[in-house]
Image (tube, helix red, strand yellow):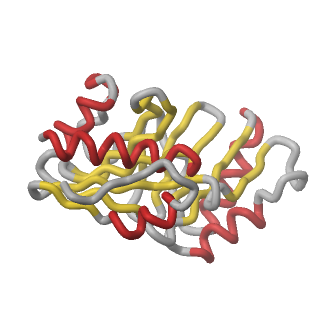
Amino acid sequence: MDKSLTGSPAAYRELGEVLPLTVDSTTLRVVEGLRVVHLRYLEHGVRSVESALLHQNLQALPQPDTCAGPDPWQVWINPTESLVLTSQSAVADSLLHALQPGRDILACALDQSAGCLVLELTGRHVDGVLTRLMEASANPQIDGQSTRVRFMDISATLIRIDPNRVFLAVDRPQGLYAVQWIAYVLDTV
């Protein structure tokens, strides 16, 4: 691989120059234009969240360790949190308006689009790459599964879209770190 990634402040601009990165039929890219809405709710706030989701013709909250999709993808995080990943700004804006912080003391939606980087890994080596970067048992194997994982030494959300396609959502400041590790492993498969 002749593309390099540095840790400089300009590195995030450089991501666009080195990604997408394809090695032996496996591609890493940033999912551009994806809105990330974080839904937080207490037990009695579920009704408010589900009402906002149903207003957008979305399913009720996802079940543990699952992801309902496609776009928008509804990703289970824990019993009181989920993510909605979407390229549809109208969906994100509607959820943010309906669940504006302070409107309902038991539920809210936060726009984390600017603070989250979603990477897409596709191809025949997806599982080989992931098993070198995280605990193998944490890797969801079935389409529509998702899980919080320890990706090297950072927290990430891993979403299995199909057998050869996953999304990896990380905090944006840790995005370059994740890309560097994936690029390193791709170069050694």
Compared to 32, does 179 lie above or below?
A: above
Q: On the picture, is 29 further left or further right than 13?
A: left
x, y percent for residue 20: 30, 65
x, y percent for residue 30: 40, 62
In-front residue for pair 173/35: 173
Compared to 156, does 7 lie above or below?
A: below
Viewport quadrant of the N terminus? bottom left
Please give the count of numbered marks on the rendered protein: 0
x, y percent for residue 75: 49, 47
Q: Residue at position x 23%, y 40% from top?
A: 185
Which quadrant of the structure image shows residue 82?
Answer: top right
x, y percent for residue 117: 51, 55
Q: Residue at position x 72%, y 53% from top?
A: 109
Q: Residue at position x 68%, y 63% from top?
A: 95
Q: On the picture, is 148 further left or further right than 92?
A: left
Viewport quadrant of the C terminus? top left
Q: Residue at position x 54%, y 37% from top?
A: 77
In-front residue for pair 151/79: 151
